Image (cartoon, rainbow, N blue to C red):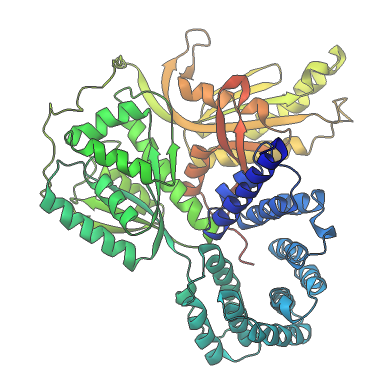
Amino acid sequence: MTGAETVHREQHQRLMDARAALARGDVISAYDLATEEGTTDDPDLAYIEVRALAAMGDWQSGLARYAATGLEQRDDTDFRALKGRLLKDAGRLTEASEAYAAAWRGPQDFYAAINAAATAFLAGDRAAAIPHARAALEGARAAAPDYWSLATQAEALILLDRPAAAQAMLAQAAACPDVGVAARATTYRQLSLLTRTTGRAIDLEPIRPPRTLHFCGHIFCEDPETEARIGKSARAVLREEHVGWAFGALAAGADIVMAEACLAEGVELHVVLPFDEADFIAASVLRGGPGWLARYDACMAGAARVHRASAMRFVQDDHQFAFGSAVAMGLARLRARQVGSEALQLAVWDGGAATGAAGTAPDVDLWRANGGRCRIIDGAGLPRPRAGQPGDVMARSVVPPGPADARRLRVLAFTDFKGFSQLPEASIPVFWRSVIGGAADVLEGASAHLTCRNTWGDALYLAFDDVPAAAEALVCLGDAMARLDLAALGLPPNGGMRIAAHYGAVYEMPDPVTRGINYCGSEVSRAARVEPVTPPGQVWVTEPLAAAIEMSAPASFACRYVGRIALAKGYGTERIYRLERGGEQSAL
């Protein structure tokens, strides 16, 4: 096989994998595959890239990439209709209807016709909506009876004021074997909006996308009877709640039993490790007895993805477990947002109150405190491990922190200003007053939650003790810097502030030089490596911080996936999100 043939084969496989990821609603994997380093200018991969951006609610980037990749110039209905989808998400409904209508060529293009009808209807142009709806209905009836043709007929019947017929057609669509998660999510979102707008009572439950799940529970020793009871209950909940994705750790006992239930039920399993894997196995898997290790390995092998909340070693700090749990919860909610569904928690819990920073009770409290719904499996009377069992001693030597070495969960932000090093000496005072002074004005509003702040030259180093306050301050800082007239200040026109932030557990220490509070640890280094690769004018955050924002302030902020980015100084790669104001994804 020649080199060109090998590249072609790899490209084709990447395209197939990206399509499959998009169909099952894994838009992050679809985006990563479509934009993977080494991909050629394949229009099909470009189409999937833009589709994934749209599915993540990032219509701004989607429109930019749609234009840059030349998709509109291709004589393909799907490619041309994609512009309508992006304009619809942007709220430009009349333009969206016109784009869909332009993509429609005949009965076989009923997808374009029904979207032209829906967007015209939502724009208030009922006269234009009706003929498009009739054309879509006619074309869909003539097509093979698959999910999309049946769902299109249901949508057209809603617009034509025939709710009973629409309900019957929707039931047929939901029963189709070819229906995927992404298809359900798209239809559910569209029909939810149409039924609210029309006031017609249509039951959309048959096409509701699967729910996402965060699972947690007590560690316990192997016991076949207990495991069978919990596994049976977990599988019943997974079926009742129509769960499609599950996020959690794999500690001995409840975690592993529920993960096994997920794999048995065909639920996509996402494992979230709170820290170094070998240390986690020693602290949380072997603690329940050696028999759990093989089952841990089997669950890891069956997982769709393993997320590492932190790569740091375990330093006998419960906050590391709490941090991992918070990341898992946020990831479950991020996935629910992407597919337009609900995130649910399933906990094996004895009902006892929280006695520390980590554990099942704090996990349940955090989930409920942020408006989440929780299903409980009775965890009373479990065969809990005794002190001194395997796992109480770390697998590798770790020097525990001293009693005065406090650990804290903090949002850590680094910024600098591109072009600062090129400034002439006379411009430095102007820069200091306008840029650093402007930043200080913004940060004053967050002073109650700023536990550390420092500056040198053009750079800022900030630590916050509250996630929503940090998100607000960073977005406001970005907005303030964007309003600067760089030319008037004598600053380079291609300059701008780069803002990057991360969330993790760090040591809080008195700084012997500044005489104030400072933070140190591997998570500080991780945060610092993101800022140099951040584009000027944007706020980039790591996946742990994106998850924390989704948990604590989903209505105020949105984290748009950027991709897997190589960090500065060879620090590996990181899944990065762009932080923006405005949390709820468009219902359009």
Q: Residue at x 64, y 45 (%)?
A: 9
Q: Is residue 156 left or right of residue 67?
A: left
Instruction: Examine the rendering and report whether any part of residue 445 can be seen.
Output: no
Residue 533 screen position, x and y as percent: 67, 28
Left or right, 74 with reference to 239:
right
Position of the N terminus, as image quadrant, is top right
Q: Nearer the viewer, residue 562 or 429?
A: 562
Please tell me whether residue 311 is drawn above or below residue 354 in the rendered image: above
Image quadrant holding the C terminus, namely bottom right
Quarter assignment of residue 527 = top right
Q: Residue at x 76, y 49 (%)?
A: 65
Where residue 20 appears, as percent x and y from the top left, is 55, 56
**Quick one: which residue is furthest to the top in this view?**
513
Q: Is residue 2 above or below residue 140?
A: above
Image coords of residue 335 (percent x, y): 49, 53
Q: Is residue 477 visible?
A: yes
Image: 108 above or below 542: below
| Residue 145 percent across, percent down from the top left | 57, 81
> Is 201 left or right of 36, judged from the image as shown?
left
Q: Residue at x 21, y 41 (%)?
A: 219
Which residue: 61% across, 34% down?
565
